Image (cartoon, rainbow, N blue to C red):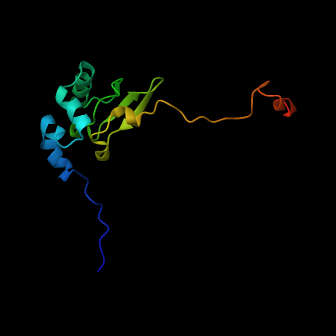
Amino acid sequence: EKRSKMAKEFTYRGKTVQDLMSLSIKEFAQLLPSRQRKRLLKGYTDDQKKLLEKIRSKDRDIKTHSREMIITPEMIGSSIKVYNGKEFFLVVIKEDMLGHVLGEFSLTRRRVMHNAPGVGATKSSSSVSVR
């Protein structure tokens, strides 16, 4: 028996992307964990409503500061530039991001990369050649 190497179709809580697209926000919220469900059912803020309008109008250059926006099925496939405190970071929304928050994909902290110690940092740094 040889299995064909077909890509497994994505499902979220047993529903395909097409099924999720046909659900209303309230129906989709019932599939989410409790924290995301509560936040969706409370309604969108003004910034989030503005972001959704841009997504629905298929705007090309979407920028937002709304890092707390929960990713819903209608956002799949769109590219959004999310502010991380310094710059706008491009986030392409895929199926497996459903239920997560935009800010999770635009990191605010960089990895610290240490180099040689600075001048006068320690007593031992005086033995390091200054070039």
Check the picture and name the quadrant holding the C terminus: top right
Q: Residue at x 15, y 35 (%)?
A: 25
Can residue 131 be seen in this snapshot?
Answer: no
Does residue 123 sit above or below 32 in this rendering? above
Q: Nearer the viewer, residue 110 or 39?
A: 39
Taking the image as shown, residue 108 lies to the left or right of residue 72, namely right
Check the picture and name the quadrant holding the N terminus: bottom left
Does residue 12 sit above or below 50 in this rendering? below
Q: Residue at x 75, y 31 (%)?
A: 117
Residue 69 image point, x, y percent = 29, 30
The single residue placed furthest to the top in the displayed view is 46
Residue 8 image point, x, y percent = 28, 60
Q: How many numbered discs, if any?
A: 0
Can residue 89 be seen in this snapshot?
Answer: yes
Residue 23 image point, x, y percent = 13, 41
Residue 27 position by quadrant: top left
Residue 124 position by quadrant: top right
Taking the image as shown, residue 17 lies to the left or right of residue 91, namely left
Q: Residue at x 16, y 42 (%)?
A: 21
Taking the image as shown, residue 105 lies to the left or right of residue 95, namely right
Q: Nearer the viewer, residue 67 or 93?
A: 67
Residue 113 position by quadrant: top right
Residue 64 image point, x, y percent = 34, 24
